[in-house]
Amino acid sequence: MTPTATASANTNIALIKYWGKADESLTIPTTSSLSLTLDDTWTTTTVCFDGGSAGEDAVTINGSSPSGTELARVSRFLDLVRGVAGQSAKASVTSASTVPLAAGLASSAAGFAALAAAASRAAGLDLDDRALSRLARRGSGSAARSIFGGLVLWNAGTDDETSYAEPVEAALDLAMVVVVVSGRHKTIGSTQAMRETMRTSPLYPAWVASSRQDLSVALAAVRSGDLPRLGEVVEANALGMHAAMLTSRPGIMYWLPRTVEVLHTVRALRDEGLPAWATIDAGPNVKVLTQGSSAEQVAAALRERVPGAAVSLRHPGAGVRSGEAVS
């Protein structure tokens, strides 16, 4: 039989951000990061090393066949797997996702984590979680974190061996409210935006330095179960990342007017006593960190005060699973 494997992975949202690569070829980040893997937001991928189509990898994502850069990115990743496995067969890849693509909701994290798990297994590799995290990182940096569930630390490291993610134990009752104000594709991809921020923003070096301190504060808050302290540093870290982007030349702005509206709403909710802290990735949509026991109340308030936005509630999700069609 032709080797075939299926795997599912959930998206993750960075609490302390990954923004910038010290080594692009190996996807080694400039800073370590902390994330929360979410439930109900997943990608399922099946890989079969059957020769592909017309001697090329055949890829289907959400019923469509990508071309150009998107197809090349998947094929380059499959080449990594083929190289480790010592084989050359092209593959057929079928992927389905519940995550809006290129909207700042970490679709590539779930996608490449699922692809790493399915492709490595189909190629006959039996990788442990750390090795799988390192492999997923080569497809998309944040995919290294989606190998694990719950809170996850991605150690930046300095080379392929030392740059990997690992789970973080926490007694915190966390949840995240996702506020989608736009599902449109980003005007500039994350990789290009990272490069331009690193190259031209005068604030980027300061953000890198402060982010390392932010991570220390966040991990201490996790260890002590201090949600307000964690929320404060999470919101500040995200705003700092976007400040660095805004001061790139030319400035990179992912926010829409409704993004700012949501940010003001989150602050108002906090002033009213609700545990709510905003974070934003490379896109216009806002994720709101909150306490699990207060999550329904926070979500209801956001639905009421930001009409027209798609507001959904997410709890901590599991790590990558092999042999599953859904999550």
Image (cartoon, helix red, strand yellow):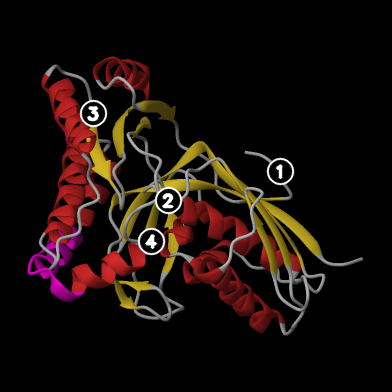
With 224 as the anchor, is 131 left or right in this view? right
Which residue carries the number 3 mark?
276
With 290 as the anchor, is 101 left or right in this view? right
Q: Is residue 239 above or below residue 294?
A: below
Range drawn in magenta: 199-212
Quote the CA–CA distance across marks 2 and 3.
Answer: 21 Å
Label 3 crowd (10 A; few <14 / some 14-19 / many >=20) = many
Q: Is residue 265 above or below residue 138?
A: above
Front-most of 137 and 300? 300
Which residue carries the number 4 mark?
154
Q: Quadrant of the N terminus?
A: bottom right
Q: Residue 153: x, y in percent? A: 37, 56
- For residue 325, the mark is 1
Which residue carries the number 2 mark?
106
Residue type pointed to by label 3: Ala
Residue type pointed to by label 1: Ala
Q: Of circles 4 and 3, which is in front?
A: 3
Which residue corresponds to the image point at 45% horizontal and 36% vertical from the top-left?
Answer: 316
